[in-house]
Amino acid sequence: MGLPVLFNCILTVLLAAGPSMSAQTVRGVVGQSATLPCMYSVHQGVTSMCWGRGWCPLNGCSNEIIWTDGHKMTFQHSGRYYLKEDLSQGIVSLTIENLTEADAGTYCCRVEISGWFNDQKVTVNLKVEQGEPFSFLQMRCICKTLSLVPGT
């Protein structure tokens, strides 16, 4: 086996073996907010990270939504996207406000860990469903049950 072939085999194994978690599914409702979980250990210190749309590429994030330097956000695609937790604790879960059906899909959280192929990658599938609006009849039944409708 030639050296280039051996190198390609080793590189393929290393790429496939990089730290990664299986895809999680989060469900949300149109008009509400949803939080996509992601966290990392800060024992070695805080580090930069990003959130993007789509699967995690080999490096960085595709279709970037948020970047941090480990202390503060350095890029935010829109005010609908934010990290509401304390970044210094390694909690970098993405919250999306005012969900639309267009928000459904795959998201990637990548935490940059020093060294080759050490980045932590979390893939989250967001499913967005229409909310069930209350009809007038449903509201009347609820109010009647609670004795809030006069004359009932």
Image: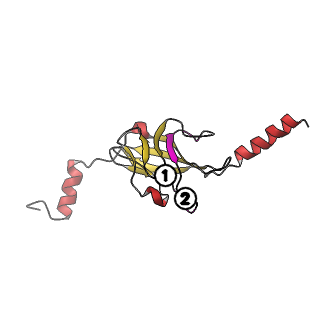
Asked whether the viewer can see residue 106, the reply is no
Residue 111: x %, y % from top left: 56, 50
Residue 46: x %, y % from top left: 52, 56
Residue at (45% x, 52% y) in the render: 71
Asked whether the viewer can see residue 24, the reply is yes
Quarter of the image with the N terminus in it: top right
| Front one among 106 and 44 | 44
Disc 2 to disc 1: CB gap under 8 Å: yes
Residue at (80% x, 43% y) in the render: 10
Quarter of the image with the C terminus in it: bottom left
Look at mark 1 in the image and give the residue it sits on: 70
Look at mark 2 in the image and give the residue it sits on: 45
| Front one among 133 and 50 | 50
| Front one among 122 and 103 | 122
Q: Residues within 10 Å of mark 1 (few under 14, many from 20)?
A: many
Query: Is 47 within the magenta?
Result: yes
Residue 39 relative to residue 76: left or right = right
Label drawn at residue 19: none
Residue 47 relative to residue 139: left or right = right
- Give the residues drawn in magenta, as a range: 38-56
Provide the secondary structure element on which disc 1 rests: loop
Provide the secondary structure element on which disc 2 rests: loop
